[in-house]
Image (cartoon, coloured by chain):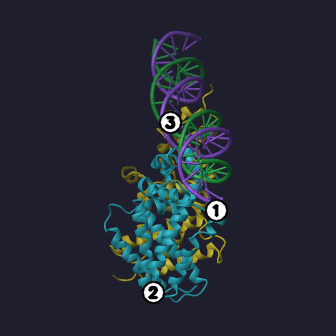
Chain colours: A cyan, B yellow, C purple, D green
Amino acid sequence: MARVGLTTERLTLAGAELADEVGFDEVTVSALARRFDVKVASLYSHVKNSQDLKTRIALLALEELADRAADALAGRAGKDALTALANVYRDYAKEHPGRYAAAQLRLDPATAAASAGVRHAQMTRALLRGYDLSEPDQTHAVRLLGSVFHGYVSLELGGGFSHSAPDTQETWSRVLDALDALLRNWPAA
Amino acid sequence: MARVGLTTERLTLAGAELADEVGFDEVTVSALARRFDVKVASLYSHVKNSQDLKTRIALLALEELADRAADALAGRAGKDALTALANVYRDYAKEHPGRYAAAQLRLDPATAAASAGVRHAQMTRALLRGYDLSEPDQTHAVRLLGSVFHGYVSLELGGGFSHSAPDTQETWSRVLDALDALLRNWPAA
DNA sequence: TCAGCTTGCCTAAAGCCTTTAGGCAACTGC
DNA sequence: GCAGTTGCCTAAAGGCTTTAGGCAAGCTGA
């Protein structure tokens, strides 16, 4: 009965890795137990239930993403910052599809409010300081950027753009050009 | 042993209704059997397996959405058409959240190619005829519009914009204004 | 109308996932 | 080294999926 050294953190991390390998929907308490070569019931001392596990993975992903975003934004402004932030999301989704899917998990309002999700909105706002937008247009723009980043990345990841010319990298740059142009020239209400 | 009259179509439709009520992830062969007051195994003559059921619901949702989109686009052009198409997606997602989630199901390439998904891309292209874009910018714009529609709707549905002013309806109109402005003034490469 | 066939829904059963309760052994601190 | 804590285990119940095989309801043709 050697002890493996399970902790909530190790389970969450292993769950995130598992998600990247087999997909977030396939992450299961059983599969995780198998990965640690441990009986299923043993995990329930560290994790409340399956939902709890998934929520923890989602929160981890949100943190990682926010950290990367903060890094990318440091010392940049304007289009440079826009591109950097956008690429953080896209690259993260490609590197860690399971984690990215986890980050999309619907959290209950209290959990969401305490999550790194709020940092994401703040950073998008910070980015917009490089453009000349005042409220409420700034909020509209925050939501637009969030929509484009999320929408593009999830369509691309889901194969929505596949097998068609021009390639998605090219579209991505042109979309960022277009967004930059739009933000510099936001139409008046 | 009265026969209930199960058919693949009725199961698919009931599955779609179930999805709207309890969420697409909660749609299960068992739950569907319960809804028809029939034993679980009985469904397996009409549906290959759980995945097959979900795929059929997804295809149904894509058809319904494409039909609504075609309707909305008829006789409209320019910003009028843009707004109409965008609202089809948003309204459908609000009316039928489960079906909308189903429409996001990743289909294998062959199924996807035979689905109504292709009609969606064609209609977005048709919409862009009202703007002056030539290839490859037209394709870039198709992808951008797809990303914004999908991204905005799924963030809004997921509660991503909730509890913050200004309200999401206002943002939605302003985002459509911005997209219209952008399409009329697409930046050169 | 009824014999015969098709086919719809059923029972049975096996496999996997979740979750809870209770137990023993391995660490921890004194 | 001993007591207490805690980690992982066994056991068990309940739900979902899927397959195999059976009976009877309802159509088909004479």
Quadrant in which residue B175 is drawn: bottom right
Q: Is residue B66 above or below residue B182?
A: above
Give the letter of the chain under mark 2: A
**Residue sitting nearer the eye, D5 or A184:** D5
- Badge 1 vs badge 3, beta-carbon distance below 8 Å: no
Q: Residue at x 32, y 60 (%)?
A: A163
Image depth: mark 2 or mark 3 in front: 2
- Please state, as top left, top right, bottom left or bottom right, where the C terminus of chain A lies in the image: bottom right
| CA distance separating discs 1 and 2 | 33 Å
| CA distance separating discs 2 and 3 | 58 Å
Q: Secondary structure under badge 2?
A: loop
Give the letter of the chain under mark 3: B
Quadrant in which residue B5 is drawn: top right
Q: Residue at x 59, y 63 (%)?
A: B157
**Residue sitting nearer the eye, A28 or A94:** A28
Quadrant in which residue D20 is drawn: top left
Q: What number is the disc on residue A77?
A: 2
Say which amino acid is labelled 3: His
Q: Secondary structure under badge 3?
A: loop
Picture coordinates of residue B88 (x, y %)?
Answer: 55, 64
Say which amino acid is labelled 1: Asp
Q: What number is the disc on residue B46?
A: 3
Say which amino acid is labelled 2: Ala
Whether discs 2 and 3 lie on one chain: the answer is no
| CA distance separating discs 1 and 3 | 37 Å
Picture coordinates of residue A116 (x, y %)?
Answer: 56, 71
Q: Is residue B104 above or below residue B126?
A: above
Q: Is residue D3 above or below residue B166?
A: above
Q: Secondary structure under badge 1?
A: loop
Q: Residue at x 48, y 39 (%)?
A: B49
- Badge 2 vs badge 3, beta-carbon distance below 8 Å: no
Picture coordinates of residue A182 (x, y %)?
Answer: 46, 83
